[in-house]
Amino acid sequence: MADLLNHKKILIIIGGGIAAYKCLDLIRRLKERGANVQAILTKGGAEFITPLSISSLSENKVYQDLFSLTDEAEMGHIRLSRENDLILVAPATADLMAKMAMGIADNLATTTLLAANKPVMIAPTMNSQMWANPATQQNLKTLQQRNILVIPPADGDLACGEVGTGRLADVDDIISNLEDFFLSQLQNNPLKNKKITVTAGPTLEAIDPVRYIANHSSGKQGYAIAQALRERGAIVTLISGPTHLPTPHGVMRITVKSAQEMLKATEKTLPADGVICVAAVTDWKIENPSTQKIKKQKGSLPQLKLSENPDILKTISTHKKYRPALVVGFAAETDHLIEYAQNKLTKKGCDWIIANDISGDIMGGDENQVHLVTKEGVEHWPLQSKLDVARQLTKQIEEYFK
Ligand code: C5P
């Protein structure tokens, strides 16, 4: 699924350290997240990993030699910095850091760094004495003063057999630094740091400890909305009924079962700037669920007494103390779609209703066709992937918060 790193163009400069092998995992993970990765492999880096393994994972050419005729015909060192959003030096050796600090340009990597007009991030790794050496510490300071971003090395066993500070940061750590960087780029985005709660998935209403009533909601649309909001910098809490979906990156997920639990968890996130109720809340619950498994008895069927579930959307929309600035509901209908959605808007007291026709294979499918119903009118959106619906809705929410 797409996320903060989706479509981001990252140039990795791979220095000569034993930890260069971690770059392969890093590149694989970045590709999975939708990033476009190019790599410069230094001479030292090539002692540890091969250009073939890098290009297989990055699905891009690997650049190695400053004086390669084809690369230089395209002014490789200039172009590489211009066409990427960020340059990441990993591993950044003591030697590379020193060259960067001095402005030495004696190979493709250092020349590209000197010619760079894009943000640069380094992930240093070296022996702990080399790291602690005043020369390295001075270089580090110089680089930081020039706004080079630093992912500090970790403590632990070093490849040289010593123990101390100097291990390349974990791939997870490098990725979260990259996410933070791209998040910080969204400075002027109206959704940045807006607190938004999304409900998603079905709710399960217990009959007894083993049985329940529920519905076919997959949670896909709600998860896609949580993801799209996060991509644009919102602080997203996803209150989800049981689903098989992975939690979108950077989203805080709270898993619940029943509608009652979902209401409680949603109310706990207030005050919030927005609440988007996508969950297919089961309309009824069993009035008195049995605490023991109901036994099958010949000739007698269990009588289930139903009662109405709390309406989360309505509760939030009419909240006396913490009514969010924007409350959005969904209306899944098989007929009279727009008419029912307009009624729902009034009945529930929310600001927008996303009406979707569920007569086809919408529940559980990957596509959705929806209509945005507001007090001002109705917008018909095309049939598109649930992620694109989520992105279009997110754009609309951005406009609202501008
Ligand atoms: O009333 P109906 O189920 O058609 O309304 C759908 C909208 O209301 C959805 O946004 C759904 O998440 C929300 N809802 C709710 N709590 C309920 C029932 C529906 O939040 N008990």
Image (cartoon, grey):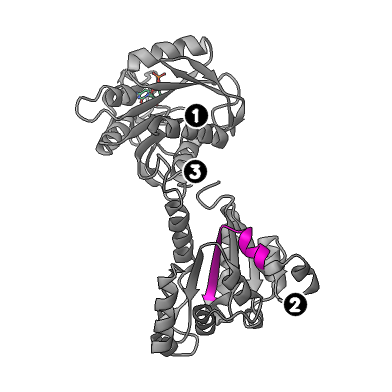
Q: Residue furthest right?
A: 69
Residue drawn at 44 percent across, 40 percent down: 229
Q: Which mark is residue 245?
A: 3
Q: Which comes sooner in the sequence, label 2 or label 1?
A: 2
Residue bearing the label numbered 1: 216
Range of magenta residues: 78-91
Disc 1 element: loop
Given this view, does label 1 or label 3 mark the residue nearer the observer? Answer: 3
Q: Is residue 137 left or right of residue 357?
A: left
Q: Is residue 38 above or below residue 33?
A: below
Local crowd size for mark 2, using a 10 Å CA cut-off: few (<14), some (14–19), many (≥20): few
* In front of the other: 170 or 177: 177
Disc 2 element: loop
**Picture coordinates of residue 143 (x, y %)?**
45, 74
Label 3 – label 2 distance at C-alpha: 48 Å
Local crowd size for mark 3, using a 10 Å CA cut-off: few (<14), some (14–19), many (≥20): few
Residue bearing the label numbered 2: 67
Q: Amino acid at mark 1?
A: His
Local crowd size for mark 1, using a 10 Å CA cut-off: few (<14), some (14–19), many (≥20): few
**Picture coordinates of residue 390 (x, y %)?**
51, 34
Disc 3 element: loop
Residue drawn at 50 percent across, 85 percent down: 159
Q: Amino acid at mark 3?
A: Leu
